[in-house]
Image (tube, rainbow, N blue to C red):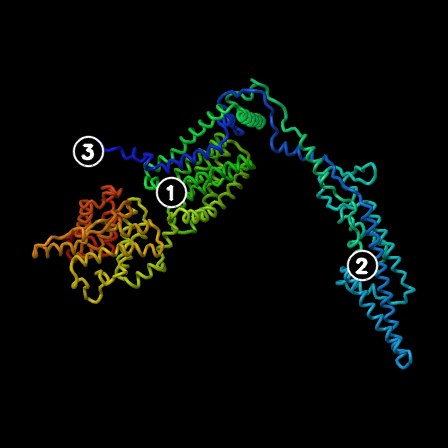
Amino acid sequence: MADDQKPNPLVQYFLLDRYWKQYLIIFSLILAISFLFPSGKALKYSYQVNDITQEPIIAPFTYSILKTEPKLQNDLDEKNKSVPFMFNRSDEIVSNQKDALSEFFAMTNELRHAIWRLEESKRLVYERRYHKQYEKARSEFVSDSANLSILTNEFHKIYSFTVDKSDWLSYITPLQDPIFMKDLDRNSDHVIQICKNRWTEGIYDITIGDITSHQVMVNQSDVPDLASPTSFNDLQSAWTKARKELLSVFSDGDLFRDLGYDLIVEFMKPNLLFDREITERRQIESLNKVPRSQGVVLKNELIVDANIRITDDVLQKLNSLSVAVTKQETNSGWTKIALSFLGRIMMLSVVVSLFFAFLVVYRVAIFRDWKLVLLISIVFLLQLGLAHTFVIRLEWSEYLIPVTVGAMTLTILFDARIGFMATTSMAILMGLMMGQNIDLVIVSLFTATIAVYNIRELRKRSQLFVTMFALIAASIFVIVGLGLFKEHNWSTMLDDIQLLTINSILAPIITYGLIGLFEILFEVTTDLTLIELLDYDHPLLKRAQQETNGTFNHSIVVGNLAESCANAIGAHSLLCRVGAYYHDIGKMAKSEYFIENQFSGENKHDNLTHTMSARIIRAHVKEGLNLAREYALPKVVSDFIPMHHGTTRVEYFYRMALKDAEESGDKVDESSFRYPGPKPNTKETGILMICEAVEAAVRSIKQPDIFKIEAMIDKIIKGRIDDGQLNECPLTLDELNRIKGTVDGTTGMLPVLRGIYHIRIEYPDDPKSPASA
């Protein structure tokens, strides 16, 4: 096809038959985002305090002014407090607990008698040890002992609170004749009376702090008793009052002062039972009667004139109008709803297309992969979904939206330009979602830019956490700047700074988790993974050091060259170095057939035909790909293995074959000497092709100097261009010139090679000083 008949490449990118998946994903993203946005008419009345109106705002219809959230919540709380908590006085509990106390003292009395009887039996056994009634006395002792054991076990089982306190043993064990055990009756009367006093006052079964109503209602007769919550006791205050009364009844040194309190705690149960079901039902009925509005705005009434500062009262009227408009649109006809929704999609398409047009023009390789487009769309949807949830649904501050998470995630997964462009689009969308919130757009763009800048070249995981402090500083700077410009008070600015500080601390942590998840799900290779692949302890690199030491050293030198070249043109220098380290791993299969690994002086190729030698040399590409799959190298790294040779010839053996063919008259099949490819298709793989060839060629130069090396670089680059090896690679002639570098520069090949071969620039001798150094 002639050049003037070739279709525009940019137009080809939009062909639906090639990229229908990408367009479907983008359309689905726009459709999903559209459901997160309020209606366009509602956004018309979306302002913030201290904004200046551009035109008069007149009520299109009569509507109610909604109460602010704090005002409504305060009214609801007050109404809730006006509903008395309902309690039922239980005489049954009082009766049961009095009986239980009486039973305790009765059993204590029985236990005391059992102990006294055992002591008497023991005394009779001793006195009658030589008497004929000894056996009878001994039998009574055994019986009394067994009876005491049974009573003791039963007592401790029922009243376990007496087990761990030694004073109870002293109290139960009598020190005198049972006739003088009248203290039990006295103690019983006092404890029961103290409990009755508290029951008469009333004891709640919940704490007074849990009672939020102004009054309580107690059902204790035909007519409920309405009183203040403090008119009755909760259990804690009842215990305190009982304790004080107990101390006033019993003198110091009386053992029962402490034991009596144990009984009160154990037996004095609440007798005012909270009726939760009735109380909550009455509260709900009462809350439903609380009006949600506080006045009305009449149709055609001026809400605010043009060029007027928005106050809190005006803002509430506008917010109420937005809610009324949304309800009205919901109840309108399907045609109106459909047209409004269509307009929303068109508006969102304009903003979203800004980013994806950038992908098509400047990152077409990413756009061609539908999985990566899906990944970016997921980040967009998560970011906007969180914004909708936090601000519109939960009504939290917009400064809790983790804007920097999306920016950092896309920067780490792809590059800084994609991260910044995506953040710009998302900031605009979030600003529109919040009603032209320019403050949110400014804060989002500034903090995201700082985040992108800090991790644009991620080399250490700690950079993610250093970014925390940079984000905190950026947050303080932008909030103070906006606050001073808009004359906000310092308390408002401090609140915003606190929220952004929380956001700044959590964002890198969330980002760290997300990139690991996305790497696994979408097979994306980040700089963090590349850094791990540079570790000499990686199993594959360790094998290369042991089995192909010469090739490994060659790869390290090529890595230095490739990284310097990548820096010269702004390519991915880390990827170039990693690709260089692994590009020749296939030589491990037959390492002895490669000159850099032949240390014994014997050349294995001397006994082979040139075609067979070329086949062995070419096979290291296939072997390298097999090892890459075995060790799970990322595709972006394994691509360097076939592409660093492209479809070039194994030049030495090809020329030797041609020489032999001239003598024998045979033909040489060039395809047998060419690598299978593919050709380099990225700047990084193109750089490695050139650096690998240059490194090998320069080593063959005898007595190298800077002029010979420069001539060799020019020869190799020209040869690769003439052979069409760089046809699919986006390297320009200017970039190829910068890749070569200059002898006095800091990037490109020449400065690195000058350092490797210790080449110094020769200065002309000073005629006046021929012996100068």
- Are dots 1 and 2 in contact, CB under 8 Å? no
Which amino acid type corresponds to the residue marked 2 in the rendered image? Leu
Work out whether residue 238 or residue 617 is closer to the camera in this orientation and state it.
617
Q: Within 10 Å of the Cα at label 1, are there few (<14), some (14-19), or many (20+) other Cα atoms?
A: some
Q: Nearer the viewer, mark 3 or mark 2?
A: 3
**Badges 3 and 2: C-beta atoms under 8 Å apart?**
no
- The answer to whether residue 709 is visible is no
* Dot 1 or dot 2, earlier in sequence: 2
Mark 1 highlights which residue? 372
Q: Against 589, is 56 above or below? A: above
Q: Residue at x 88, y 78 (%)?
A: 135
- Residue 462 drawn at (x, y percent): 43, 51
Position of the C terminus, as image quadrant, is bottom left
Q: Is residue 324 above or below residue 29?
A: above
Q: Amino acid at mark 1?
A: Leu
| Residue indicated by mark 3 | 2
Of discs 1 and 2, which sits in the foreground?
A: 1
Image quadrant holding the N terminus, namely top left
Q: Residue at x 29, y 47 (%)?
A: 684
Specify the quadrant of the image occupied by residue 447.
top left
Give the crowd class for mark 3: few <14, some 14-19, many >=20 residues within 10 Å. Answer: few
Q: Which residue is mark 2?
A: 259
Q: Position of residue 179 (x, y in %)?
A: 92, 64
Q: Could you tell me which secondary element the residue under label 2 belongs to?
A: helix
* Sequence-first tag of 3 and 2: 3
The residue positioned farthest toward the top in the image shown = 300
Spatial separation of the CA atoms under disc 1 and disc 2: 76 Å
| Mark 3: secondary structure | loop
Q: Quadrant of residue 491?
A: top right
Residue at the (74%, 39%) spot, across then down: 85
